[in-house]
Amino acid sequence: TPDEGMAWLTALGRRGGEIILVWHYLTFDLLFPALLSLTLLSLLLVTGRRLAKFRTMAAPAQSLLALVLVLPYTLADYAQNLAVARLLSDFQSANPDSLAFASALTVTKFALLAIPVSVIAVFYLADQRQAGQGGEQP
């Protein structure tokens, strides 16, 4: 709840917020979204190219499709990181609305992550089905 979030930010204090900011948000959370996004892009292309219909698309179209599926997650993740970093860097100006916004971005980030992960799973299962029916393998 917003009250619990405010209590947590207050208990952290300025020093605790700085520690979390430096050790978590300025290191791990700068790299992880980019690395996960690149991994998702690669998996989309690899699993997609195992399907005949996907292979018939031009390479730039394949890449664009993968990017359109992954980019919303990437943007939401970085937006959420910025919102949380702002809360941690200036916890005294935090309010229930800013906490609710950061929380909504967290939920949005995971919902958007489910899209490329689901498409990768569908591509993989379609490839398995194709292989089981004696379909062509690259």
Image (spheres, rainbow, N blue to C red):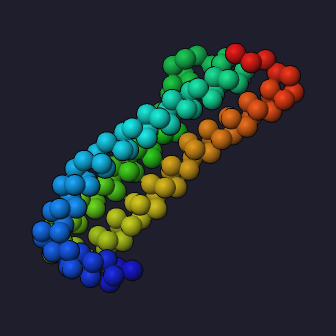
With respect to residue 70, does 28 lie above or below?
Answer: below
Q: Residue at x 43, y 33 (%)?
A: 38
Note whether residue 18 is visible: yes
Residue 65, can we see it? Answer: no
Q: Is residue 116 left or right of residue 50?
A: left
Residue 24 in which image quadrant = bottom left
The image shows residue 70, relative to residue 106, as above or below, that is above
Residue drawn 22% across the image and 61% down it: 20
Q: Is residue 65 left or right of residue 87?
A: right
Q: Locate residue 49, reporting x and y percent.
A: 63, 22
x and y, in percent, of residue 46 in the image: 58, 26
Q: Percent from the top left, x then y, of residue 117?
A: 57, 44
Q: Nearer the viewer, residue 84 or 125?
A: 125
Q: Residue at the spot x=15%, y=74% of the render?
A: 13
| Quadrant (top left/top right/bottom left/bottom right) for the N terminus | bottom left
User: Residue 28: where, in percent of width, then height?
Assistant: 30, 48
> Residue 33 occupies which quadrant of the picture?
top left
